[in-house]
Amino acid sequence: MSKVAHYLQEHVLGQVITSAEARRYFSTDGGVFSVTPSLIMYPANENDVRKTARFTWQLAERGRVIPMTARGLGTDQAGAAIGSGIVMVFPAHMNKILELDGKSGLVSVQPGINYGRLQQTLHTHGRYLPPYPASFEFSTIGGAIANNAGGEKSLKYGQTRKYVRSLRVVLANGEVIQTGRLSKRDLSKKLGLATFEGEIYRALDKLYEEHQNVLAADQPNVTKNSAGYDIWDVRRKDGSIDLTPLFVGSQGTLGIVTQADLNTEVYNEQTTLMAASFDDIRIAEEVALELRALGDGPSALELVDQNLLEFIDRNNPNYLKEVVPTPFPKLMMLIEFDNSNDRQQRRMVKKAQKILEKFEIGYQTERQKDKQAELWRIRRSAAAVVAHNEGKLKALPIIEDGIVPPERFNDYLEGIYKLFEKHKLKAAIWGHAGDANLHMQPFLDLGEVGDRQKTFKLIEEYYQLVMSLGGSTSGEHSDGRLRGPYLEQLYGPETYAFFQQIKSIFDPHGTLNPGVKINVKLDDIKPLLRHEYSMDHLYDHLPQS
Ligand SMILES: Cc1cc2nc3c(=O)[nH]c(=O)nc-3n(C[C@H](O)[C@H](O)[C@H](O)COP(=O)(O)OP(=O)(O)OC[C@H]3O[C@@H](n4cnc5c(N)ncnc54)[C@H](O)[C@@H]3O)c2cc1C
């Protein structure tokens, strides 16, 4: 064991592990990159996180930088949950619900709690967290906060950021802060603090004062965004300030979350689900735009494409039998309404039916749970692509999560099909039609030199396509290592410089998840590309308490 591991093991309550096996295990996440950590730590409590941060800060002051990477369940698909120093794994012990107020719906949790477990508990109180990611059953709240995750309900309810009321965060030097909106008066108290927190507030105050032009600059005109830092809702016109938006979506690069207070919504089980088939993508775009424009509109507007339906038909012919019309349409959309007032729900469904009929689109409407579950299988079948292997060919998360303005939906899909054609790929597409936020994972073999080269060509061409359509490189999965290199082009040099200053205010020594999101170049990530890809291992290596 190294001196660092020894020191930590003596000073923290949780376990510290340096075995080659554990280091290999935590060298990958759900993405295509690999970085081997020097040690793994399972923090038992916030104090462990504090002590570790304080220790790395002191070492960094003496010129030795040991990166700290917070980790939930490691499903991140952009290489944000791996790092070369200390990987701090939260689900082992810091996985509790601390408080749940059934009336207000406010819930306080530790970051390592499994999202699915929390959702189940909330359901028993008639509540839920709407921005759950598709991976909710095998990921954590900490990961969702750090990625500003979103999902099928984000169309109506927004992303994780909207539900985070306040966070407890361990700063780079080990100080603990509680975030929340501070009035101008409270801020002036913070500005006077002789602590790192005080330093942060002073530096931010100055930064925001001097760069107001940056905040007025154009941003991607999209309905969801997890790229970059959310610098826009920190300081408001009334002089108040809140650090919460900065930490949400920051991927552990500004601080480590040890507790989150979250707002929840009332859970309405009575929904209506419609499935519609399209043979013309342009019409699918028009329908999506009209559905979006319905005032109290759909709670989900999801899609799968013909390639996905064909893939499922080839690999599991019974799975979608009698659920999807044949011959397969170009696109299928699932349209869900969850309005709490039943009459209003029926009214909205009628309006949606009228829109579909105007465009002569075939559809079916279901209010019964079991029938709805059958239809949802169409969208859930994307999981089969992600998990599928064709020999050494694996479905790689390299070009995915781009989002464009909803009125560029058709151009986006056409552009992706052209990209596939150019590279002789036939990849399935699925995602969030209402937000024009799409996912796809082409089959490639990372053991082959040709496919490794193709990987970076695809990455470059796909993200250029997304940006050329006025989109954002990440709708919900965030930047990580994969999309970090495109942030400067996405936001422009001035906004990017603002992001860089934010990073250096919170993390002056570069100990917080370096190499992720900010200050990342394509040449940094190329050598990190794995030679094989698999997610098989993600669940089996955790002490639990
Ligand atoms: C099949 C599949 C489907 C997916 N679908 C979606 C989807 O629909 N929507 C979506 O948004 N994402 C999706 N993802 C991506 C990912 O699963 C989610 O973003 C998820 O919320 C990450 O949670 P995790 O526990 O796995 O986090 P990890 O992968 O462990 O970590 C993710 C990031 O969070 C940081 N982090 C973790 N804990 C903390 C903490 N305590 N403090 C500070 N930073 C922390 C890590 O450093 C890392 O940067 C999907 C992934 C897969 C494999």
Image (tube, helix red, strand yellow):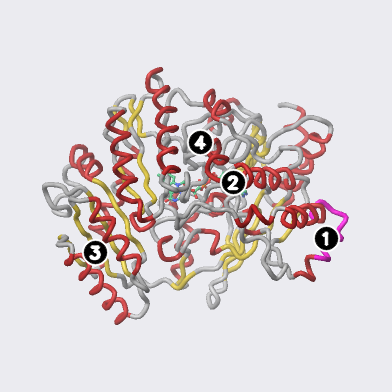
Residue located beneath label 1 in the image: 191
> For the point 61% across and 64% down, which residue is it?
261
Of the residues shown, which amino acid type is indicated by label 3?
A: Met
Mark 3 element type: strand
Q: Which residue is mark 2?
A: 251
Tell me if the residue at label 2 has its CB under 8 Å from ligand 1.
Answer: yes
Tell me where residue 461 sits by quadrant. Answer: top left
Q: In the image, 124: left or right of 299?
A: right
Q: Main secondary structure of the magenta part?
A: helix
Dividing the picture into quadrants, the one containing residue 41 is top right
Report if residue 512 lies within the magenta region.
no
Give the foreground label among 3 and 4: 4
x%, y% of residue 328? 15, 47
Tell me which numbered mark, 3 or 2, is placed earlier along the sequence: 2
Asked whether mark 3 and ligand 1 are closer than 8 Å, the reply comes as no
Foreground mark, 4 or 2, reads: 4
Specify whether residue 43 is in view. Answer: no
Tell me how far mark 4 sits from mark 2, CA to CA. 13 Å
Badge 4 is on which residue?
Answer: 482
Classify mark 1: helix, strand or loop: helix
Coordinates of residue 246 in the picture (x, y in percent): 64, 54
Provide the residue span drawn in magenta.
Answer: 188-197
- Considering only vertical position in the picture, is 517 above or below 134? above
Q: Secondary structure at mark 2?
A: loop
CA distance separating discs 3 and 1 = 53 Å
